[in-house]
Amino acid sequence: MPDGTSEFGIGAKVLRKEDARFLNGHGRYVADIARPKMLEAAIVRSPVAHANNLKVTAPEDSKGRFFTADDLSADCVAPIHVVSKFPGHKGSDYPHLANGKLRFVGEAVAVCLAETRAAAEDMVAATGLTFDALPPAIDMIADAEPGAPKVHDDWEDNVILDSRFEENTDAFKESAVSVTRDFRMNRQAVNPLEGGAVLAEWDAREERLVVHSASQIPHILRNALCECLGLSQNQVHVIAPDVGGGFGYKCVLLPEEIYIPWVAMQVKRPVRWIQDRREHLVTAANAREHHYSVTLHADSDGNFIGIEADIHVDSGAYAVYPHSNILESTMAGRTLHGPYKMSAYKVRSRAVATNKPPIVPYRGVARPGICFAMELAVDALARELGREPCDLREQNLVPVEAMPYTTITGGEFDSGDYPEALRRARGLIDLPAIRARQEAGEDDGRQIGIGFGCYIEMTALQTSAAARAGLAAIPGYEQAQVRLMPDGGLEIGVGVQNHGQGMETTLAQVACEKFGLEIEDVAVRHGDTATSPYSTGTYASRSMVMAGGAISRTCDVLGERIRKIGAHLLQCDLSQTEISSAAVTGPSGSVPFAEISRVWYRNPEELPDSVDPGGVEAVSGFRPEPDNSPFSYATHAAVVAVDPDLGSVEILDYVISEDCGTIVNPMIVDGQIIGGALQGVGTALFEESNYDAEGQPLSSTFADYAMPGSTHLPVLRLDHLVTPSPLTEFGVKGLGEGGAIPPPAAIANAVNDALREYGVEVAETPITPRRVLTAIWKAKQSRLSSVETS
Amino acid sequence: MKPAIFEHERMSSIDDVVQALANADGEVRVLGGGQSIGPMMNLRLAQPDKVLDLSRVEGLDGISEAGDRLSIGARVTHARIEDGEVPGTTGAYMQFVASGISYRSVRNRGTIGGSVAHADPAADWPTALLALGGEVKVVGSGGEKSIPLDGFQVGPFTTGLGWDEVLIGFDLPALGPNTKWGYYKVNRKPGEFADAIGAVIIGNEARAVCGATESAPFRVFDIEEKLSGGATELSVADAREILSGHDAGFDDYELQIHAVALSRAIGRAFA
């Protein structure tokens, strides 16, 4: 355990090492990299959601600068093919460039190359496309049924995977109170500041393909390039330079990451593709779309009996590499219970293929939808029972004395005090004061409401779960390479990728904790397959747990080698030495790391004969033992004001009480939570990728796609519980995604609380003014008609 | 998102602009601050053959007051108006409007003339200036003339500007110190284009404008009559009733938010 004595170790408020380059504009992204004789690529994309008999006419004079699926297949480039091990899963090819059939608007059809992007876009405009349009599958519920337009002709229907989770269903008979509701979380786009970006060239000297990509998973990208292009691992070098945010969008393979490198090999010149925002909003409209029909059962005292649900997840047209297209539907089906104890469970969850972009695991992965459905059902039950929703939650959360806790579907909660997080959030937001304020009413005619959202987040996906799903990337022992430099500093290589999380700082803090180094003496290198250990990359809130754990374990190995040299120089026994303040200390004094390095690198004649020839550089690894995931959790509480004339929602106060285990850097933890929460506000109130009945995207610029801004959150009030995980080094738990999970639930519950006198329940995100007003009017109308009939 | 090929011509005088427009072969667009036409060209929604850049033309960035009239040049930026360069009550009204247009870097470049000539129904100036009343000053092959703001915008992105004419500025009333004004913009986030605008000015005459419609902003004479008659408030229900008599193509939600905008604009005017 950290003892808090290291100035730059675990728990220290260290300023980010990355800040200097980012704040001074010295970051280097793919778009900042130019190569001699580089060509720019623009992509011809499908203008329709569904069609067959695609025929492409190249622009005039485009020979050698225009490529289609025919060129790929002539060169035997293999398509992406992701299959799950779950029984009944329907697999399909994901062609890099559309081949005969078009399956969503924005699907890549052809690559145009020119000296400038503008000229390449001219070629796109001059490309001819003919096809026979087909009726599209757009509605995941209707199109899950037989007779719907089929996204994949050789499938029986559009259901990719139909999962059923049933436990102890007899107990439903015990229920005294039940509420049934439908909930919908609409599709949205993942919006990192930087979109997709690829620069590829064949390096004739190194005899390998060099690919720069804005990726969260450089090693997995290398695997995919080898599999699709038939290259050996030694022939592919992937570099992820500075990456401007990812949020999951960049932890899956983009087709461009295969076909741009292939095109570069054909033209024997560097080729660069920089995704623009319209391209992004159309092709990356790929997250969150869930529908839930939920019945929550309780006894007359409000103890949850269990939950029944029918879940649909719109998974889009294809399965993405490596995480497939069933991650969301299976997670939603298995963990709809959230942080609550219950004794019965009956959930059906279907992943449905539609003519939309393939779903990707956006920050929070399925849990924003799960939390939205469960938490709104809890509030509906509280209204039914006439209970304070907060009290009903407290009564049903898994209590601290039950930890570790096995959930009804077999999950393992490792540690934590879930009710305490709720109690602290309730105290901070001052529930009684809000209830009193509601009694008094508002001078401006607005309605005030308070809402809570509790969640659990399984962080750092474990080996067995990924293996059970048969994912194309299964995380095992994460590794780190730690090297004592000739001047006594440390260089650390990791395979996870930093794209804004501050990992160059937090991972360095682990080494500072172990060795008592100063933060500037530790450099963290990542994002380059040529220099870092293999890793499945950055996703699933895993990097601090896994790479941090790996650095800690590797420092143990390296520390012993350093101590051996130190013991020799101090003329004492190894057992008499220890490391602190970047020095080996023994009974007679201490030897700084710089001195150890001098001897190893510059004056090896001073080394003892018994020295470990492995030197002052080590690779080792870490995985939670046993192979389980640490669970983070939190309660979010929101106070909102609803304007009943405009339907607008303002967040007046927002409180988060969370537990991510041991905190490595308090400022970075707060930053991650705040950023995540604002993205959650986007899901709750703003962001929506709209489609018309033909499957045409209606939200293809930021004029039509509303992003939340800094004015949409009040100053967040954060509160931290610290329950170290028994599974991990230092007791850390994953943190990156959690902030984005409960805001839709907490905000919707607050809106419904505000509008309870109107008899209104919103049940769909984003909660737009139009939806709020429509709900108010509908409730009014149904009251009127019920008065008339009575 | 790169524009199709086009010719960029930096103009040195209004006469050159008029001549270039008169001799135009293909589509020609006039470039003010470029904050609307720029993105539209990047999206290839606009593909002009030639762009006539006004940035070096002299005499378009003046602000002057003479008696009860204000003259404002076409190239005056939103930022200068936000910073209070327009004097008096008219200036205060315009300052309020300008400060709600997009964000500062757009206001630094975007111009009032460009906004009115572009005539995006969701933009602020077409509605705000119609409430003010006054005239648009234009120069064309036939020389200089004035067109009343009433009726200047005829539809979405369509004005009374002739194909060979260029907008050079505005002749606006300098409102008296006792003039009441109110402006209410409904949008999802600060600075965004409007979903609805209500603008009212009650001085020598009362003017009330419903803006951010599917088409041109329009004056609401029934409301003006009430205001002239001494009304100092208007309920949302009454505003809905009045607006539903206009053929604006509103659905129920749009009718509601435009009614609220007008009701609250009046509320602000008399607050």
Image (cartoon, rainbow, N blue to C red):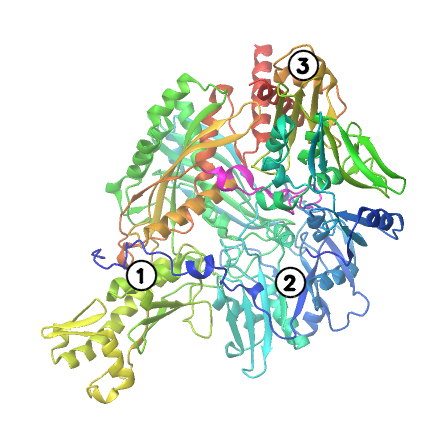
According to the picture, the residue beneath numbered tag 1 turns out to be A509
Label 1: how many residues lie within 10 Å, few (<14), some (14-19) or many (20+)? many
- Which residue is located at x 29 percent, y 83 percent? A601
Quarter assignment of residue A39:
bottom right
Amino acid at circle 1: Gln
Q: How far apart are the two marked residues, 3 and 1, measured between alpha carbons?
A: 68 Å
Residue at the far front: name it. Answer: B67
According to the picture, the residue beneath numbered tag 3 turns out to be B227
Nearest to the eye among marks 2 and 1: give it.
1
According to the picture, the residue beneath numbered tag 2 turns out to be A95
Q: Kindly state the secondary structure of the residue where label 2 is placed.
A: loop
- Which residue is located at x 47 percent, y 72 percent? A529
| Image-based side of A507 in relation to A349, left or right | left
Amino acid at circle 2: Pro
Residue A625's x, y, as percent? 29, 60
Contact between marks 3 and 1 (CB within 8 A): the answer is no
Magenta range: A684-713
Chain containing mark 1: A
Nearest to the eye among marks 3 and 1: give it.
3
Nearest the camera: B108 or A291? B108
Label 2: how many residues lie within 10 Å, few (<14), some (14-19) or many (20+)? many
Quarter assignment of residue A462:
bottom left
Amino acid at circle 3: Leu
Above or below A17: residue B177: above
Q: State the count of labels.
A: 3
Q: Kindly state the secondary structure of the residue where label 3 is placed.
A: helix
